[in-house]
Image (spheres, grey):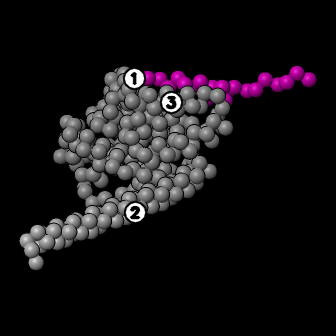
Amino acid sequence: MRKGDLRSLMNRTDDSADERSTQERVRTNVKNLIDSVTSRFNKLKHSNKAVRALIADPDDTKKVFEVMATMRGKSLVRIFKKFKATKTGENILRRRVELLDVLNDHANLMSLAPESFGQAYLSFLDQAKLDSGGLVYASEDYYQNVQDPELLLFMRRNRDSHDLWHTLTQYGRDTLGETCLLAFTYAQTKNPGIRLILLLASFRLYREYGHGTFAALWRAYGDGKRASWLLAQPYEDMLPMNIEQVRVMLSIPDPNAYRVVLARQNTPKKRLAA
């Protein structure tokens, strides 16, 4: 065999190997894409079912955590890294501070000044007939497969601060108030599960509350974007402070759009003339 023929044969062999390698990479990429799409579809299907169950029963808080766990994507890790990089986050993680222990000390909170954040928090719990650890059972499944103790501490802190956020934003426990707080929370966390809940729940809310519903939700989202990042606040140190001063410090305005909708719904309809 001549040199030229040998070189040509070797080139064809190399080209064939490159082609097989390329085909293998394409097959692998297509398979990964199909697996990813299938996984996303299954998550969306599962979350959609949970959201519909939540809409049918707004008090089923367990479904909120179920959707958030299924659809959270990388949002949890992202906000945890952001929290960990803050002075408050570093301090909380180093000292292993459990917010729920502080909130469960009602004797201490009751000893605070009448206009304090802590007293406003207790007033909210009393009016809503809640207790500080009310979300513990509902969130049990949310922590499955999370092994990092620091991440678990951060997740528990977010859960236990939920009613503190109610107190700060002044959104009530009614369905519109809870959904407005979710819109505020989505602006702060960008959790895709919360976004899904908002999208599917907003039209049902409109049927229930009517004109102004979307404006209230949009205002809540905007307020959440403009407010300080509530996930990294030293609540333990803020509870003795005046509640209004805390709200101003964190750039949280009054929820006027939400109040307008509630006021209109609670206004008795005029009777038609006989």
Task: Point out the image quarter for the N terminus.
Answer: bottom left
Front position in the image: 94 or 209: 209
Q: Does dot 3 land on a helix, a strand or a loop?
A: helix
Residue at 52% across / 39% down in the picture? 179
Front position in the image: 191 or 185: 191
Residue at 46% across / 44% down in the picture? 194
> Which residue appears farthest toward the left when viewing the image?
3
Q: Which mark is residue 203?
A: none
Task: Point out the image quarter for the C terminus.
Answer: top right
* Range drawn in magenta: 253-274
Front position in the image: 49 or 100: 49
Where 258 falls versus 156 (above or below)? above
C-alpha separation, residue under disc 1 versus residue under disc 2 = 51 Å
The residue pinned by badge 1 equals 244
Of the two numbered discs 3 and 1 in the rendering, the one whose residue sits closer to the viewer:
3
Of the two numbered discs 1 and 2 in the rendering, the one whose residue sits closer to the viewer:
2
Where 190 falls versus 260 (above or below)? below
Where 86 falls versus 151 (above or below)? above
Labelled pair 3, 2 in contact (Cβ < 8 Å): no
How far across and how far down the image is residue 9, in percent? 17, 72
Q: Does dot 1 land on a helix, a strand or a loop?
A: helix
Q: Report the side of 124 relative to 25 (left or right).
A: right
How far across and how far down the image is residue 139, in percent? 42, 54
Of the two numbered discs 3 and 2 in the rendering, the one whose residue sits closer to the viewer:
2
Residues packed near mark 3 inside 10 Å, few (<14), some (14 to 19) or many (20 plus): some
How far across and how far down the image is residue 64, in percent? 48, 50
- Give the quarter of the image for residue 259: top right
The residue pinned by badge 3 equals 218
Q: Which mark is residue 35?
A: 2
Q: Is residue 197 magenta?
A: no
Mark 1: amino acid: Glu
Residue at 59% across / 48% down in the picture? 55
